Image: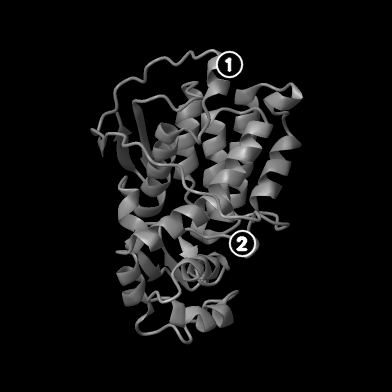
Amino acid sequence: MRSRSIARTATHVTLGLALLAVPATAVAATAAPAHRAAAPAHAAAPAARAAVGLDDPAKKEIAMQLVSSAENSSLDWKAQYQYIEDIGDGRGYTGGIVGFTSGTHDMLELVELYTQRKPDNVLAPYLPALRKVDGGDSHAGLDPNYPKDWRKAAKDPDFRKAQDDERDRVYFNPAVKQGKADGIGVLGQFAYYDAIVMHGDGDEKTSFSSIRKRALAKAKPPAQGGDEKTYLNAFLDARVWAMKQEEAHSDTSRVDTEQRVFLKQGNLDLHTPLNWKVYGDPYHIG
């Protein structure tokens, strides 16, 4: 069960075609010791940083684990394909690897994609109900068997692939694309990804685009001649402000004791080892 909600606005970034998920490369991950060792110095040259983005398979695997530590209190993000529950945030059912929700359209799009690829899947009969509850917290037409059937679907490699592809299309790829356009490295691209997963995108004041605009009012990104660390501090400040606008996100440790820690270390490429805390729990990627 998740320790914190994953909530987004109803409007999401969408692209014309679903993109294939980048294969994940395993990264060793274990619970961190209670006392974290001093972080190593990270002094990669800007040119080297630009050569590797968050879409590098090893970096992407790190990103999935970082998000899972905040959303699932676990680094085992692949165990979350089967996750589903109503966490009481007004968005109906939350399920899967990035918390697709029945109230914010992305769960509907996921099941539609799965059904396009595999028409006779166990979730296909729920599509009419998912369309009706989209935009609210109702379970009408979904209870009592939808969670059970979701977990059953999660055993199907085709459904797991659909989750990967929708994660990339709606959240990961747009975040990385914008991050590269802004000239920020792996850490900055991850900060964008984590923000768009939680807040979605659109015109709302707490959406990813609005958070970015708030940061741009304070600092320039490297693509505009600004300093990367200064800009990322401004973005994280804007992110914290957005999180505090909603009670479900009022604990900002995923920024304060995770992303901000890496930034203070100057670890703009998310070089391992990584040590951080979320909600007071320690994590380590070696």
Label for residue 9?
A: 2
Q: Quadrant of residue 212?
A: top right
Q: Amino acid at mark 1?
A: Pro
Count of labels shown? 2
Residue assigned mark 1: 46
Labels 1, 2: front one: 1
Instruction: Please determine whether, in this image, residue 253 is positioned above or below residue 157.
Output: above
In the shown orientation, is residue 264 left or right of residue 64? right
SS type, badge 2: loop
Q: CA distance from mark 1 to mark 2?
A: 35 Å
Instruction: Please determine whether, in this image, residue 41 is positioned above or below residue 65.
Output: above
In the shown orientation, is residue 94 left or right of residue 11? left
For the residues bearing labels 1 and 2, Cβ distance under 8 angstroms: no
The picture places residue 70, in percent across and down from the top left corner, at 40, 48
User: Is residue 31 in view from this perspective?
Assistant: no
Which residue is depicted at the point 33% across and 51% down? 78
Which residue is depicted at the point 72% across and 30% down? 219
Q: Earlier in the sequence, mark 1 or mark 2?
A: 2
Quadrant housing the C terminus: top left
User: Is residue 8 in view from this perspective?
Assistant: yes
In the shown orientation, is residue 231 left or right of residue 268? right
The picture places residue 178, in percent across and down from the top left corner, at 65, 39
Which residue is depicted at the point 35% across and 36% down? 25
The picture places residue 122, in percent across and down from the top left corner, at 37, 76
| Depth check, front residue: 244 or 2 | 2
| Depth check, front residue: 90 or 271 | 271
Quadrant housing the N terminus: bottom left
